[in-house]
Amino acid sequence: MSGRLLKKVLKEHEESKLQNHHDEEEEEDEDEEQLGGSRNRSSINPFDLLNDGDEDPESEKEAEIDDEEEKKKDEEADTVQPPSSKNKSKNKKKKKTKESRSNVVVKPEITLDETLEALSLGANSKQEEEVQETKPASSRPVLEIDPKYLNLENELRRMYGSKVVRSLESSSQSGGGGGGSSRQGRGGRRGVHHITKTVLITPMENWARWDRSFSMEFLETKDGYNYFRYAHSSSYEQAQRAFQAAQNLHDLNGVASVLINNPYHIDSLITMADYFKFAGDHQMSADAIGKCLYGLERAWHPMFTPFNGTSRLKYSHDANKPFFTALFAHMRNMDRRGCHRSALEVCKLLLSLDTDNPVGALFCVDYFALRAEEYAWLEEFSEEYQSENSLWLFPNFSYSLAIARVYLEKTEEASLDSSKSSSLDLMMQALKLHPTVLKKLVDKVPLKDQAWGKMLKHYYFRSDQSKNPSLDHLISIYVERNYLIWRLPDVQKLLKSAAELVIKQLDEKESDAEDFLSVKEEAFPAKHNEYSHLSIHDFSDTVPTLPPDNLQNFVADPRMGGGGGGHHQQQQAPPVRDVANRNPLAVFLESMLPWVNLGEGDDDGDHQPDNNG
């Protein structure tokens, strides 16, 4: 009904213009005729009118009444027009085109919009109108995500070139022991099939087909933000109960068996990713996280738009927590491969989804911005991001903003901007606010110059504890995350100059120390550690590994390995992975996974693990 009604609305306007202008001159050529017709047609987007299913019954009745009235008007207009020759009709057509064009200039879309509004056309349903509301403009720009930077492969190509990346991928796939083969092997037991492309991760064509075992539901629109939550199906809930039972028994075999029938069970994939990480197989760990993100993105609600900063996914909902865990692990994997620009976009996504900062993305976004050389963005973010405390009060931002200013001062535009504090002033302010950072940096970087030892003897820099649990924890996170940046000569030079000036000022005026102490107590008043849920290890570049004896405690039934291998040997075999010079227990557990093929085992015990317990 909407398309037919649209035609009649346009026809009514054209006929009314024809009756009011009989003496127009024939000056329109063929180009003007096309231009006038296109402008008249472009005043309305027909795709916006195809919402019959969204109209309520009252608007449909109103449209039907108006439709009948239009039919009568069309009949009257036809009787008014006298019979004319073929040439006259063509001339009148040109007149109509010119009149339509002139009408667009004088009084364009107002009349049409009012008519369409009365007919309830071109309007979306109430829920769509709510979802399309935008958030305040103050924080939207800094949290907008550019999807092209989310792809890790794209950044690798920018850094090393397409030929190098392709050669590495082909060598890893042919070698059988690299990341390409493990990724290629996923889903092999189900056969090769077309797989939908996603933004967060690049899936392999032979991954298991998305099983739709969970989805995402829209909750509400509040203050311009749209809130969503993941929802599990009955089959996923059953798999979750099996996973929890295996987890309570520390049975890694049970976790792997869940993945045989539920290849996109998120908690099981995250558990296997953690195991492979501790076993030292980082590629298998990254692949498991990638499969998590693939399934989680496939479940997105059609109106979930996380890249423009208008969608919220609260961490307080238990079903949403695995998404944050997988994203954070994915961000760390990007950092490990040197893709800091991509890691920055993922970090921005984490901050955008839940501004309560549940996983500590706020305490590493400055690091990724500096490593990605996004200095201007970091300053803009610190000014516009809404937080309970000003961001410069946090240890990571107080020091990182000073470092960003160092490199911005090297540009001509920034050096002429007198409205901003200099890098030296910012660094002095950071040292006065968080003096315990200096001693930790000297030990961690390390800074071996004798001048640093003399500075640490001063009473203001002597200690590495502030006696504030929350602040001490944040400082430890900052030093663990950012210490590599302090190995740059420019940054060390700035720190040394600022520390010397701070010592000189405090010797002259000790009251400055009390002023900054008052600021810290006001910003971090709690006597207990408010950030104890954030592990310092999660912000470290060091990846710990566990000895096989400790990893073996997770295995409850060794016989599960043979059954798992026999299961996928009967299916289409994935590419064979090389097991030479690898952790024996890691190879053993990989054999239980449905997407891994370790061969026929012809070595007759040559590579069996040496397990005595």
Image (cartoon, rainbow, N blue to C red):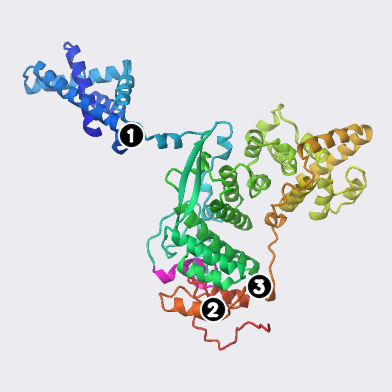
Q: Which mark is residue 80?
A: none
Reading the image, the residue beneath label 3 is: 551
Q: Is residue 238 left or right of residue 285?
A: left
The mark total stands at 3
Q: Is residue 563 left or right of residue 519?
A: left
Name the secondary structure under disc 3. Answer: helix
Q: Which mark is residue 561?
A: 2
Q: Is residue 477 left or right of residue 158?
A: right
Going by the numbered disc 2, the residue's amino acid type is Gly
Name the secondary structure under disc 2. Answer: helix
Q: Which region is colored magenta?
A: 173-191
* Label 2 CA crowd tier, 10 Å (few <14, some 14–19, many 20+): some
Reading the image, the residue beneath label 1 is: 48
Of the image marks 2 and 1, the number of the one nearer the N terminus: 1
Measured as percent of width and height from the top left, residue 551 is found at 66, 73
Asked if residue 559 is positioned above or below residue 248 in the image, the reply reads below
Going by the numbered disc 3, the residue's amino acid type is Leu
